[in-house]
Image (cartoon, helix red, strand yellow):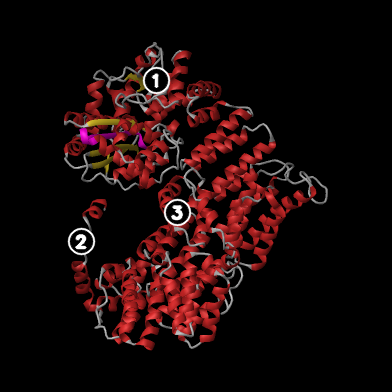
Amino acid sequence: MLGRNGEREELAAFARSVEGRTLLLRGETGVGKSTLLDFTAELAALDGRLVVRATGVEAESELPYAGLHQLLYPLLPHTAGLDDTSRAALGAVFGQAGGSPPSLMTLGIAALGLLSAAAVEQPLFLVLDDAQWLDDSSAAVCGFIGRRLTGSRLKLLLAVRSDIASPFDTAALPELAVGPLNEEDSALLLDGHHPSLDRRLRRVVLDQAQGNPLALLELPRHAAGPADGQHPADPRSLHGASPSRRLQHIYGTRITGLAATVRAELLKGALDGVAAGSGDGPVPAGRYRMRDVDEAVVRGLLVIEPSTGEFAFRHPLVRSSVVQLATPGQRREAHRTLAQLHRGDLERRAAHLAEATLDPDEEVARVLEAAAESATRRGGALTSVTWLTRAAELSEHPAERSRRLGDAAFIAGHAARLGHARRLLRADHGPDADRSPAAALASGYQALYQDGDVCYTHRQIAAVVERLAERRVAGDGQDADGTDSTDGSEIADEVLDRLLALLLATSQFAADRALWERTHALLAALGDRVGERARIYSATWSDVVRHGAGWTGPVERAADLPGQEPWDVARLAVSAYHLDVLSPLRPHLQRVVSRELETGAVSTGMVMLHLIMLDQMGVGEWEAAERTGGRALRHSDEHGHELFAQQTRAYLAQIAAMRGQTAAARELQAVVDAWARPRGIGFLTQLADAAGATAALSDGDYEGAYLQAIGITAPGAFRPYAHQASRTLLDLVEAAVHTGRTAQARAHALAAWDANLPAVSPRLALVTHGALAMTADGEQEASEAYTLAVDHPAAARFPFELARIRLAHGSRIRRVQGATAARQFLTPAVDAFERLGATAWAARARAELRVSGVPARPAARTTSLLTWQERRIADLAAGGLTNKEIGERTRLSPRTVSAHLYRVFPKLGITTRAALRDALTSLDEDAPAPSSALAQHC
């Protein structure tokens, strides 16, 4: 290894270091990365480490978890020592067990646990070559593992080509660049292997190789001519080409000189991902084994794996050159052989059949469709789209082709590939394809999620559903007027379910009575073709006040989430949110959301983030909810889902309002309202109004809160199809009480009771009884209603509402029964508000306690009371930056920066900017140290 002293020293230190580490080598093809991997692996083995090797293969780059299986396969016996969750995660991914595919986090933890269990007996050294060819799912898990090896007995060494985009380009792993050799070392390497090269040819080789070690070794052999005595080639024949291009030409020349039978063997090996190099370890079970290919060894195209005696390609470029030089017919024949070899592996067989089949073949199309379903369930939505598209191309019947293209477009839409979904449908050349249900779905997804056009989407989807309803009345196959139907055949239940789900989602976002009534009428016209899931969504997404009672049981019974498609999981969880029973579903959402965002149904993953965020808000985990919201906003912006981005901002506005960050809440409210109101997205305008009402209550602006609340619904009634009407019950009542509108407050509380809201959801039961306690005419009634509220079995699941009810009742008791009697209600209210970080409500409750005779106690001063945004702004201000300069760095207006600092000063107990630095230092010193478990995780 001439000229690699620096790399060898760094790699030797890496191999021999005690602590767990990760290192990624990056360099061009042929620069010597594999040789450096071999060198380091040998050092690690001599140091007593167990070396496990794997290699990325281009032929497997679309098979979910193929690379991870190759890496972990030798260690699978150690799964016996893992917990049930980890064994289930690995079993689901590797096809050893059924169940729900795990999230990236769960699978990463399981893989890390397996590696750690294996490392107990002997320290592990993982080597992954050609990592640029890893499938996305495996790359994500390897990146997860690579960032968490500190303190372990594990090392991970990877190599990627610099001239090919790689999943590891953004993995944030430590890197070592492997560059070309300098002129002196290039000459030494060339002279050492080809000492008799004449001076002219030597100069040409040095110029053409450009310091690439593999080119320096191969170009002279190419110039000398092949072993069969043919004329030598001029290495300048590819003047201006890169070293990798020249190497491909060299290997191509050798391949064309092989016997046809040998080339056929090499082709099958290349298409099945046979390893390249002599250090890649054992051939995975079931992989094709090349036979009678000694001629290729003589020509320098293959090597023999020392540990197994199996043939392997000398270099990945040999493998790719074999495939490129084969004719289409030769490749198809090889794929047919390989499909038969892998007949027991659904996805691998499907991948080969897809390439082997030229003419329409319904049997192959069905295999591809089954493999696509398998890939979707394992988090490989993009692979599923590819296979469904190929299945459509191989369909024998136009109806099946259209259906499969529609399925591919549906999954592409959920994978945040809305443009690709539209292109797929344009490929459908069937009659009236542009009016097909699949076309309506694709255009509807794009219009709704990218543009927020609820009117267009509802009109498009409703028109298709209406035609189906008319056909049901007239008889299958004809529209109501007796003409042939658009689709020419009865629509599949699965497609109808998709249409209804989008129609219901659009109706939910519109929150418009007329649209909802049309939607309900269409569902009624379809009769028994509407499944239970659609009926659940219709009742719970529309108006829980009028339709929500009685649906909690069906939702909970349907919540057997493992094995369900990701979009079905998300839809059911939306129903659970509206019924305030989302918390039991959150663990499953958290397990699968990362997988969907990384390689699966990205749009569905964003919905899952919203649901996780909403549950965190409800149970009082506001800091976690804010972090989840930031993650959701990044994904929404990245994929151009403006509707989801604005929805996230609305939820962030509500968090800010509850925490007393009212300027930020109002700024977010204004942004959401300005985007949503012109588009008629009532769901978002109601969220904006609700955030405004909460912000006003937080500020003690009860008149402003009342005006915001009645913008959602009038007192004494719950506006139909306004989902925030019942959710702002406590806001309207509290604002009305504080502004002297006792009659309106009482009427609204009684309206909730008359609507039987306590039977709809546990949260509505809590706030209904709380509102009745706030507005009761007599003390006996107030006490009874209060007791029903706080003694509700689910009251503790909604700590913010519970604390507000306690504060209101404690204030009433102080006025009626005296200070001493009020303390038992006010003290837990103060504690709850401080735990939540609801600074304004905590200050109000402390003031009530002071009036009741309890000595004043300082506000809890912890880092948790400073949000990440407040802390960032405070640090910049402490560093001497002006509000304008801070705004430029944080992309906030100077007014918003000022509002943040206005809230920071009282939290830190200071009054001037000059005191910021000392206060922040003191805050850091006073903050409790993280637990050892948390510190280890971080």
**Which region shows up in magenta?**
119-131
Instruction: Report the label total.
Output: 3
Q: Amino acid at mark 2?
A: Ala
Residue 111: x and y in percent read 33, 40
Q: Is residue 410 above or below residue 6?
A: below
Please tell me which of labels 1 and 3 falls first in the chain.
1
Mark-to-mark CA distance, 2 and 1:
70 Å
Please tell me which of labels 2 and 3 falls first in the chain.
3
Secondary structure beneath label 1: loop
Residue 810: x and y in percent read 37, 81
Relative placement, left or right, of 841 versus 179 is right
Q: Amino acid at mark 3?
A: Leu
Q: Is residue 83 above or below residue 719?
A: above
Q: Residue at x 36, y 22 (%)?
A: 312
Packing grade of label 2 (10 A; few <14, some 14-19, many >=20) is few
Mark-to-mark CA distance, 1 and 3:
67 Å
Residue that label 3 marks: 585
The reply to whether residue 655 is in sight is: yes
